[in-house]
């Protein structure tokens, strides 16, 4: 029996540094790049694109969405800069400018048509 006990001690010594990794939980690696876009930046980009698309509708939707996109993009860029935030900022500025230009054009057109009497002619035609 002494021989068997010696072999067990030798086996224990041989595998004494063995570690069992079968039940170990590995934490996923942490990504600290900081280049991820946040929700406000995406909202600013969406509002900016919609501002460009709707600026021809008398200018008001373009102005409102352009201002909302600017606010979202600026706050989102303060939390972390990415390409999405900068694109949202640019699209919002373009939509705001197009909305203002469109609003000025429609105000000028209505004023001009009123001066030449075209609006009165249309209103009299439909008996308003």
Image (cartoon, rainbow, N blue to C red):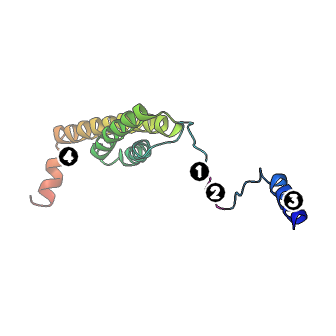
Structural distance between the alpha carbons of marks 2 and 3: 32 Å
Magenta region, residue range: 23-27
Which residue, given by chain and number where applicable, does mark 2 sit on?
24
Q: Is residue 79 above or below residue 56?
A: above
Which residue, given by chain and number where applicable, does mark 1 sit on?
27
Q: Is residue 107 left or right of residue 10?
A: left
Which residue, given by chain and number where applicable, does mark 4 sit on?
118
Count the numbered circles shown. 4
Mark 3: secondary structure: helix
Q: Mark 2 or mark 3, which is nearer to you?
A: 3
Q: Residue at x 84, y 63 (%)?
A: 5
Q: Residue at x 44, y 46 (%)?
A: 42
Which of the two discs, 3 and 4, labels the residue nearer the N terminus?
3
Which of the two discs, 1 and 3, labels the residue nearer the N terminus?
3
Residue 92 image offset from top left, x and y in percent: 39, 38
Q: Mark 3 or mark 4, which is nearer to you?
A: 3
């Amino acid at each position: 029996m002494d021989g068997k006990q010696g072999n067990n001690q030798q086996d224990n010594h041989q595998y004494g540094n063995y570690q069992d990794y079968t039940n170990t939980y590995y934490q996923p690696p942490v990504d600290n790049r900081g280049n991820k876009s946040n929700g406000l930046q995406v909202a600013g980009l969406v509002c900016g694109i919609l501002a460009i698309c709707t600026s021809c509708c008398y200018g008001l939707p373009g102005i409102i969405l352009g201002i909302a996109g600017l606010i979202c993009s600026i706050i989102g860029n303060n939390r972390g800069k990415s390409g999405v935030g900068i694109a949202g900022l640019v699209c919002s500025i373009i939509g705001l400018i197009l909305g203002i230009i469109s609003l000025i054009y429609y105000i000028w057109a209505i004023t001009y048509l009123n001066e030449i009497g075209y609006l009165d002619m249309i209103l009299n035609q439909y008996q308003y």
